[in-house]
Amino acid sequence: MANIENSFEFCSSLTCTSLPPPRTRIFKIIVIGDSGVGKTCLTYRFCAGKFPDKTEATIGVDFREKVIEIDGEKIKVQLWDTAGQERFRKSMVQHYYRNVHAVVFVYDVTNAASFRSLPAWIEECRQHALGQEVPRILVGNKCDLRHAAQVSTDVAQQFADAHSMPLFETSAKNPYGNDDGGRNNSDHVEAIFMTVAHKLKSQKPLVLSQLPCRSGDTVTLRRQDEEDRGTWGCGC
Ligand SMILES: Nc1nc2c(ncn2[C@@H]2O[C@H](COP(=O)(O)OP(=O)(O)OP(=O)(O)O)[C@@H](O)[C@H]2O)c(=O)[nH]1
Ligand SMILES: [Mg+2]
């Protein structure tokens, strides 16, 4: 079994630093929903602070991370931007749900079919044994296109209430105004993910060991409860 002190020595010998850096708690949040609803744009907006110039359909999963500070503690929010297209997700889907801390369901307010798909996404979570304690939120995206909306706030709110989820309506493109130049009163993407992070902060998240456990692009993570037991595991 790996020993943390030995591992830090190993880390030091590789990186030539004398002290291990402080650990950062990591929260894994998966973002799911139909293809084209704007999952990539939303996660990009939160992590990069702007709307991407162009996007292509996500294949498998893209990871985006952002370090945020809550109550004086720096934590890392790791967003798993998943593929909406079945053919691009089937080989990855079991990885999405491993050690997940929160789920963000996204639909497109201008696309009623993406709203009707939500029960299927909820069912996929259930099939992957996601515990009831894992927070879920519902996000209606593309509110800058209010004139083309097919899903009313009332209907979405009823659905959210029926599934005990908070509802946020937003626009990854323009959270400040609609395409007619007026205000759309949408929630800010930043505020949505910060709300999730606040909710998670009191839970026991993955801990980034800050050790040289890289294998390709895979970082070895372990859960706080594994740390408590002194065991090691890969959170990927
Ligand atoms: N008007 C508007 N367009 C948006 C918004 N968010 C995303 N889009 C557009 O919607 C299209 C799909 O966006 P993506 O973020 O790639 O969608 P996705 O959910 O990641 O799709 P998959 O990766 O296939 O699952 C792109 O053309 C985006 O420019 C938004 O808030 N407003
Ligand atoms: Mg995408």
Image (cartoon, helix red, strand yellow):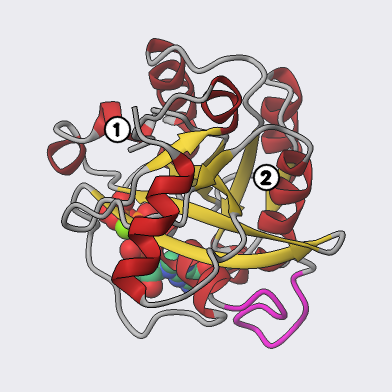
- Say if mark 2 contacts mark 1, CB within 8 Å: no
Does the Cβ of the disc 1 residue fall within 8 Å of ligand 1? no
Q: Can residue 110 be seen?
A: no
Left or right: 136 in relation to 231: right
Position of residue 182 measured from the top left corner of the image (x, y, whole percent): 75, 83
Residue 151, located in which quarter of the rendered image? top right
Position of residue 67 measured from the top left corner of the image (x, y, whole percent): 60, 67
The residue pinned by badge 1 equals 95
Position of residue 11 relative to residue 104, above or below, is below
Left or right: 48 in relation to 97: right
| Magenta segment boundaries in residue numbering | 174-184
For the C terminus, the image quarter is top left
Left or right: 217 in relation to 108: left
Type of the residue with mark 1: His
Mark seen at residue 234: none
Q: Please check the rendered image and state whether residue 183 is part of the magenta-colored stretch, yes or no.
A: yes
Judged from the image, the quadrant occupied by ligand 2 is bottom left
Residue 8, located in which quarter of the rendered image? bottom left
The residue pinned by badge 2 equals 152
Mark 1 or mark 2, which is nearer the start of the sequence?
1
Type of the residue with mark 2: Ser
Residue 21, located in which quarter of the rendered image? bottom right
Residue drawn 72% across the image and 33% down it: 203
Residue drawn 59% across the image and 55% down it: 23
Mark closer to the observer (2, 1): 1
